[in-house]
Amino acid sequence: MVPTFFFSLALLAFVSGSPMTLTLERAFPSNHGMELNQLRAWDMDRHRRMLQSTNYIVDFPVKGTFDPSKVGLYYTKILLGSPPREFHVQIDTGSDVLWVSCGSCNGCPQTSGLEIQLNYFDPGSSSTSSLISCVDQRCRNGVQSQDAICSSQNNQCTYTFQYGDGSGTSGYYVSDLMHFASISEGSVISNYSGPVVFGCSNLQTGDLTKTIRAVDGILGFGQQEMSVISQLYSQGIAPKVFSHCLKGDNSGGGILVLGEIVEPNMIYSPLVPSQPHYNLNLQSISVNGQMLQIDPSVFATSNNRGTIIDSGTTLAYLAEEAYNPFIDAISAAVPQSVRTVLSKGNQCYLISTSVAEIFPQVSLNFDGGASLVLRPQDYLIQENPIVDGAVWCLGFQKIQGQDITILGDLVLKDKIFVYDLAGQRIGWTNYDCSLSVNVSASTGTGKSEFVNAGELNGGTSLHHRTHKFTKTRVLALLIHMTLICCFVFL
């Protein structure tokens, strides 16, 4: 036994590159035998404690495109209930709550132009489902963040949401299991699940009722306590950071993970504190390197003002006082030989060459010295091609009478975006979202996994992953193997 421990210490010192002295004690007395089932129970108890403090990387499949002429939204697939049932939900960083259509819903679409099967959640058909009452602490948290309403008549936790496009939904809250594929330390964990509170929609209005872009619901990625990421983090299941990379080509799709996508060229800007949305402090706008003459107070964050990052918005919107200077600067930079046209009230351009050769580069300059550089295709939208070339229209719109700036999928596509809730910051960098990414379960560490776009099928189909082993992981593996050898020879 003694030589075995000396071997372990020597290997540890050799791998770490520095001498050390360790004092080892028995977990069990040497004169006291332990049955195999007792040892197994001891190990299982230890493993449970380890899992309770482990954050997993959770991977969601992504479909859809930013192009409003095709889909105009990005969505993912989730599994809810027991037995698990499949739901397609829009990815929305502009709201907090996950909700899906439920049975006996008024106004819920029956079919979808996205060629997906729409489903309805039935709490009575799930063995793990339960209603949320007003006395539940989770409901109280929702009331505080204005994500929930309590009725004194039936003591049921309910909600009513109105979205910026005029659509709306209402319903009641339930708790049930969400099933997903996750990885930790290079291993795929199958059939992993955790309880989440989500909305059961029994009424939908506006665009939510239309079949052309119909999905089963919305997955809110906000930072309030009712959001799925906050709920999973509080249970020790997922890290307090998520990332996405939305493909901007016609095929669409991309990557969505609970975890931090790690890239060397990431730049970060701090979140404006105590805001219900992901607000950043936009300080100025530059076109072709020239800063526009816009009063910085236009972008200041206050009630119904500021700059919001919102994956649930298709286009982009500028505060009213910033819109005209922006449009004028773009028009001034375009050669006079380019023909301008109006299409449905939008400023458009008829061109026969690449937009990169004609249109200027735009820079949105944020707090912390972080600039979001936009290519022409990040603020223009291509209309249907015509005989003489292509028509490109400005995708930045104006919200009449409001000083709010919203950066939607038009701007977010073809970039990695990291929402570091623990560090209260958002980071980004340009990226080809069809490639694999390096993901860490905790911000600021080198421990990571490779995630391929669309590799996991919503927690139902698991595939092998490629892992990146760091020096720390190799060291841990060697020590683990050594201690196994020690145990065998005891």
Image (cartoon, helix red, strand yellow):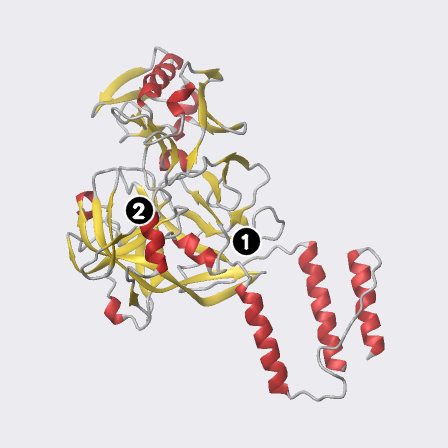
Q: Tell me: 374 left or right of 441.
A: left
Q: Quadrant of residue 68?
A: top left
Q: Are marks 1 and 2 in contact (CB under 8 Å)?
A: no
For badge 2, the amino acid type reads Gln
Q: Position of residue 51 (x, y in %)?
A: 54, 66
Q: Position of residue 148 (x, y in %)?
A: 29, 51
Asked if one can make out residue 445 in the rendered structure from this viewpoint, the answer is: yes
- Quadrant containing the N terminus in the rendered view: bottom right
- Quadrant containing the C terminus in the rendered view: bottom right
* Label 2 crowd bin: few (<14), some (14–19), many (20+), radius 10 Å: some
> What is the tally of numbered marks visible in this picture?
2
Nearer to the camera, 40 or 174: 174
Q: Secondary structure at mark 1?
A: loop
Q: Tell me: 100 left or right of 254.
A: left
Which residue is labeled 2 in the image?
A: 146
Residue at 55%, 37% in the rendered image: 266
Q: Tell me: 240 left or right of 330.
A: right
Q: Position of residue 315 (x, y in %)?
A: 32, 33
Tag on residue 316?
A: none
Tag on residue 441?
A: 1
Residue at 34%, 59% in the rendered image: 197
Q: In the image, is residue 126 above or below residue 228?
A: below
Q: In the image, is residue 16 above or below residue 399?
A: below
The residue most toward the front is 152
Asked if one can make out residue 90 in the rendered structure from this viewpoint, the answer is: no
For badge 1, the amino acid type reads Ala
Residue at 72%, 65% in the rendered image: 478
